[in-house]
C-alpha cells in the first residue's frame, strides 16, 4: 500500500502544479502587456483602490514556433489596480496543451495575481485537472484533479499551497487533507491536518 501511494503522488506531482503556476503567470503577463500605454504622468494624488483598465469576455492564446496552440486563458472580466499593481480575473478558465498531447485545465471563480506574476491566487471553487492520457510505455494514466476553495501559487519557486481543505482525485482514488504544501523543485507533497485516503483495490492481471 505504501509503495502504491508513493507512485500515485509521484505521478500527480509531475503534472498538475507546474502547469497551473506557469499558465497563470503567463496569463497575467499577457493581460498587463496587452493594454494601452498609460497617459503622461500627472501630479501625485492619493492612491485609491480603483481599476485603471478592464477587459470583458476576453480570450488570450499563445502558440509555439510551429503554430501549435500552447495555452489559452478565458475570463468574464479582468481589472488592473494600479495602487497594488494587481490583476483580478473573474470566472477564470485556463487550458494548456503539452508537447506530448496532454491536456491540462484550471478554473476558479476568481484569480488574483501581482504585477510580475510571482504570486497567483485562485479563489472559489478552484480546480486543476489533468485529463487521462498515455505514458511513455503506452499505459493509460487516469485523470487527476485537485480541488479547493483556495490555492496560492509561486511560479518562480514552483510552489503551490493552500490552507483550506483540499481534495485530490485520481481515477477512483480519493485523498483529502485540511491543508497542502507542494514543492515541485524538491518533489515534496505535504498534506497537513486530518488526512484521509480511499484507495480502490487493483485487479491482478
Image (cartoon, rainbow, N blue to C red):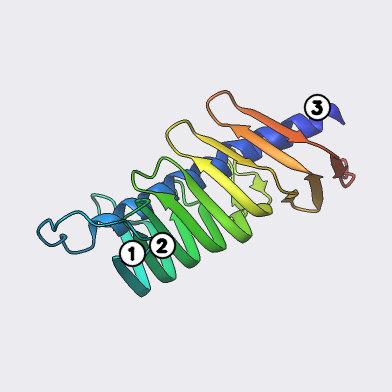
Residue behind mark 3: 3
Q: Residues within 10 Å of mark 1 (few under 14, many from 20)?
A: some
Q: Can I make out residue 29 in this image? A: yes
- In this rendering, position of residue 140 left or right of residue 94: right
Q: CA distance from mark 1 to mark 3?
A: 42 Å
Q: Name the side, left or right, on which 25 lies relative to 103.
A: left
Which of discs 2 and 3 lies nearer the camera? The answer is 2
Residue at figure coordinates x 81%, y 49% from the top left: 174
How many residues crowd around disc 3 within 10 Å: few (fewer than 14), some, or many (20 or more)?
few
Q: Are marks 2 and 3 in contact (CB under 8 Å)?
A: no
Estimate the spatial distance between the alpha carbons at disc 1 and disc 2, rounded to whole Å: 5 Å
| Quadrant of res 30 | bottom left
Quadrant into which the N terminus falls: top right
Give residue 41's position: percent from left, percent from top: 12, 56
Residue labelled with disc 1: 60
Position of residue 64 measured from the top left corner of the image (x, y, whole percent): 28, 51
Q: Nearer the viewer, residue 13 or 64?
A: 13
Image quarter hosting the C terminus: top right
Q: Which residue does the image show at 58% across and 58% down from the upper left?
A: 123
Disc on the earlier residue, 1 or 2: 1
Provide the secondary structure element on which disc 1 rests. Answer: strand
Q: Is residue 144 visible?
A: no
Residue position marked by numbered label 2 in the rendering: 73
Q: Earlier in the sequence, mark 2 or mark 3?
A: 3
- In this orientation, which residue lies closer to the viewer: 2 or 86? 86
Residue 150 falls left or right of residue 6 = left
SS assignment at label 3:
helix
Residue drawn at x 60%, y 27% is 187
- CB under 8 Å between discs 1 and 2: yes
Q: Note whether 37 is above or below 14 in the view shown.
A: below
* Nearest-to-viewer mark from 1 and 3: 1
Amino acid at each position: 500500500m505504501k509503495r502504491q501511494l508513493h507512485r500515485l503522488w509521484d505521478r500527480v506531482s509531475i503534472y498538475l502544479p507546474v502547469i497551473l503556476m506557469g499558465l497563470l503567470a503567463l496569463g497575467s503577463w499577457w493581460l498587463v502587456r496587452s493594454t494601452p500605454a498609460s497617459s503622461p504622468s500627472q501630479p501625485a494624488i492619493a492612491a485609491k483602490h480603483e481599476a485603471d483598465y478592464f477587459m470583458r469576455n476576453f480570450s488570450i492564446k499563445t502558440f509555439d514556433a510551429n503554430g501549435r496552440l500552447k495555452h489559452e486563458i478565458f475570463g468574464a472580466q479582468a481589472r488592473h489596480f494600479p495602487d497594488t499593481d494587481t490583476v483580478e480575473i473573474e470566472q477564470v478558465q485556463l487550458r494548456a496543451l503539452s508537447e506530448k498531447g496532454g491536456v491540462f485545465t484550471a478554473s476558479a471563480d476568481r484569480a488574483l495575481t501581482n504585477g510580475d506574476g510571482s504570486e497567483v491566487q485562485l479563489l472559489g471553487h478552484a480546480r486543476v485537472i489533468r485529463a487521462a492520457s498515455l505514458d511513455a510505455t503506452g499505459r493509460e494514466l487516469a485523470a487527476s484533479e485537485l480541488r479547493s476553495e483556495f490555492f496560492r501559487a509561486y511560479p518562480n519557486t514552483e510552489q503551490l499551497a493552500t490552507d483550506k481543505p483540499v481534495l485530490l482525485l485520481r481515477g477512483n482514488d480519493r485523498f483529502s487533507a485540511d491543508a497542502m504544501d507542494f514543492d515541485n523543485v524538491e518533489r515534496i507533497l505535504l498534506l497537513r491536518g486530518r488526512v484521509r485516503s480511499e484507495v480502490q483495490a487493483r485487479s491482478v492481471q
